[in-house]
Amino acid sequence: MTNLIISTIAQGLLWALLALGVFITFRILDVADLTVEGSFPMGAAISAVLITMGVNPWLTVVIAGIGGMVAGAVTGWIHTKLKIPALLAGILTMIALYSVNLHIMGKANISLLRMDTVYSAIHSMGISNAVALTIIGVVVTVVVGLFLFWFFGTELGTSIRATGVNPQMIRAQGVNTDSMIVLGLLLSNGFVAVSGALIAQSQGFADIGMGVGTIVIGLASVIIGEVLFASSSVVRKLFGNSSFVLSLVAVVFGSIIYRIVIATVLYLGMPPNDLKLFTAILVALALSLPTWQGKFRRG
């Protein structure tokens, strides 16, 4: 049971990178980006193919991130230059990436059994798989979280945040909002692809269908974190006025909580085929919770 809990938390940390990528577009840029359903398996595909070719596993993660950034930049270009709505631009890129990912892998799935991964060095020390996943998950999540905190505190990062809040105002200050949108989508899908690469290595395979439902998983993590963690008065007192730090931490905790909920319902006997339906219902309930809270208070 303890091993299951540790493994679930580790998976939550690895999926937190996806959630942070969705957070950038959904909350910071206020854009609904479906590119993640293509960039996630793209990261897994690039990493898996390079590992089978003997490339260093950590280097494959970096290259996968670059591939995801290119995918995000394509969506941004379609949206800003061709003036296609962001939702449709993401759908177009997602559809195109299905074929691209098949060309990268050469087949529908690639096995990584008996291949060296980023977790192999820790395994060689006699540490269990669940603990190895947790160690890598904590290190990568902390590094990414610190980078986002630093980056969005810079002038460039602040411009991206302002673009999502009030594009007319920031455009009046001489900022190219199209460039900010492209940069935000680029960063978002880069982290999503890194998440795909790490999860593919942890599962031991990359599959063309890995991206199905990832946008819902990312949204579930963001919403659950905001509703159950960021809204807590105790947590707000702990973090003070650092609302952005609180948001980042909430997303990570939301990802972990989501994985715990999924593991619990599976443990209780829910058929795996119903997981997507359960996730959709969970996200709908989380999104509607503030409305119900407002009605309850007025009542």
Image: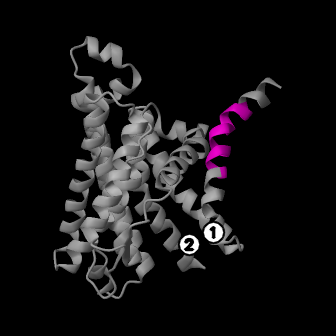
Q: Give the farthest residue toward the right.
A: 299
In terms of depth relative to the viewer, which is nearer, 92 or 171?
92
Q: Residue at x 38, y 62 (%)?
A: 138
**Three-letter amino acid code of the residue under disc 2:** Ile
Classed neighbour count for the residue bearing mark 2: other residues with Cα under 10 Å, few (<14), some (14–19), many (≥20)? some
Q: Is residue 253 left or right of residue 153?
A: right
The relative height of residue 154 versus residue 97 in the rendered view (above or below) is: above
| 292 within the magenta span | yes
Secondary structure of the residue carrying numbered label 2: helix
User: Which residue does the numbered mark 2 point to in the structure image?
Assistant: 5
In terms of depth relative to the viewer, which is nearer, 202 or 128?
202
> Residues under labels 1 and 2: Cα distance?
22 Å
Quadrant of the image occupied by residue 25: top left
**Three-letter amino acid code of the residue under disc 1:** Asn
Q: Position of residue 18 (x, y in %)?
A: 40, 54
Q: Position of residue 231 (x, y in %)?
A: 59, 38
Q: Residue at x 32, y 74 (%)?
A: 107
Q: Magenta span covers which residues?
A: 281-293
Q: Position of residue 56 (x, y in %)?
A: 17, 74
Q: Specify whether residue 140 is in view.
A: no
Q: Is residue 61 left or right of residue 251?
A: left
User: Which residue does the numbered mark 1 point to in the structure image?
Assistant: 273
Q: Specify whether residue 185 is in view.
A: yes
The relative height of residue 206 versus residue 79 in the rendered view (above or below) is: below
Secondary structure of the residue carrying numbered label 1: helix
Q: Residue at x 27, y 11 (%)?
A: 172
Q: Give the farthest residue toward the top.
A: 172
> What type of secondary structure mainly makes up the magenta span?
helix
Q: Nearer the viewer, mark 1 or mark 2?
A: 1
